Amino acid sequence: MKKQALAVFLCLTVLFASALPMAAQCGEPKAEYKKYSYMFFNTFDTVITIIGYAEKKETFDELAKKSEDMFTHLHRIYNQYLPYEGLNNLYYVNANAATKPVKVPPELFELIAWCKEKQPETNGKVNIALGAVLSLWHDERELAEMNPEKAKLPDMDKLKEANLHTSMDDVILNEAEQTIYFKDPRLKLDLGAVAKGYATEIVARMLLSSPMPSFIINAGGNVRTGHPPLDGRTAWGIGIQNPDDAIVLQNSGEPIEVLYLSDRSLVTSGDYQRYYTVDGQRYHHLISPDTLMPATFFRSVTIITEDSGIADLLSTAVFLMPVEEGQEYIKKLDGVDALWILNDGSIVMTEGAQKATAPPEN
């Protein structure tokens, strides 16, 4: 949940995986529906934008505020860096669950139980119990931001020692009591690979059952589309950021590809999202559990599927696999497509992703 650069706000319209205006393709909205948008900060340390079609502005305003409240609530529960008085959030769990079982809010228990269930399906690439390792990288990145001239890598011996305390078998869940207990006192949970997408899906399902099911949520690159826009289009246009533009131009520049989706999620993991530099080399935040170092197989991968939580989980998992392994992995999953941007700037995509690049006929 590291803070993002303010440039994300300034360049939102071409933020990677952001909704494109597509003005030339947009017809006038139907008279009974109008398009509204709302933007807010301070949840999941990113800018979140909601665009929706509603019959009345009051309806949109009410649902946008409810969405913001839900994101704020979930952000606090999943926050591993800050405590909140009276709330047994992830920070509290990491600080106390090794001494006794900690009763947690249902949203946190359900997410951790979901991760424990899904983890074996990620080829061992996503482990929310890797927190002891990831915290060493996080601390060095934070120090580098404050003192770039002192930037350094985490000590490998310390990384290996921390990696001895990363077993999900040591995370004991009691569903009846809604408690979490760590058998290993040095274990830490890190939900960074899934929390934002999981939260986005919760908000999206609320909107789908509301009077405004035609919407798009852009949660800092985690995009969830509802029903098609009510302006004659049959899909929302979503731009995929060019990794080089994201680094050089601070999240600006033209998208490298555009996908057209509705009732689907799109999540991108890339080497340009959170990183710091040591001796001229960039080190990003996506750490392989195999090497304990950032993966360098390619620049980014975008996952397309219905559920935003699944898309978030899979984007991390596939980013940590070589392209060929990732392609075989995706083939075995129903309703999932992917797009890779390779180190040489070329693009590889599944058949379903390729079809999504074609502008829909209106």
Image: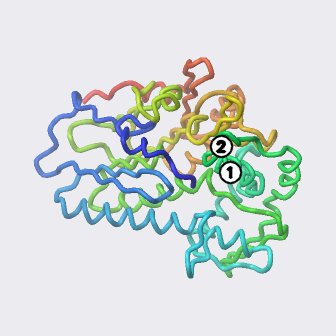
Name which of mark 1 and mark 2 comes first in the sequence: 1
Asked whether 175 or 38 is in front, the reply is 38
Label 1: state its secondary structure: helix
Residue beneath disc 1: 138
Residue 100, relative to residue 280: is it above or below? below
Q: Quadrant of residue 123?
A: top right
Q: Is residue 42 left or right of residue 231?
A: right
Label 2: state its secondary structure: loop
The amino acid sitting under disc 1 is His
Residue 34, relative to residue 176: is it above or below? above
The amino acid sitting under disc 2 is His
Q: How many marks?
A: 2
Q: 10 Å neighbourhood of mark 2: few (<14), some, or many (≥20)?
A: many
Q: Is residue 32 left or right of residue 45?
A: left
Q: Residue at x 40, y 52 (%)?
A: 48
Residue 231, relative to residue 96: is it above or below? above
Question: Where residue 195 sits in the image (x, y, percent)?
Answer: 57, 57
Asked whether 250 or 43 is in front, the reply is 250
Question: Where residue 4 sits in the image (x, y, percent)?
Answer: 50, 48
Residue beneath disc 2: 285
Q: Quadrant of residue 249?
A: top left
Q: Are marks 1 and 2 in contact (CB under 8 Å)?
A: yes
Quarter of the figure that contains the N terminus: bottom right
Q: Residue at x 63, y 22 (%)?
A: 343
Q: Residue at x 47, y 55 (%)?
A: 200
Q: Quadrant of residue 14?
A: top left
Q: CA distance from mark 1 to mark 2?
A: 8 Å
Q: Is residue 298 left or right of residue 196?
A: right
Quarter of the figure that contains the C terminus: top left
Q: Residue at x 82, y 62 (%)?
A: 169
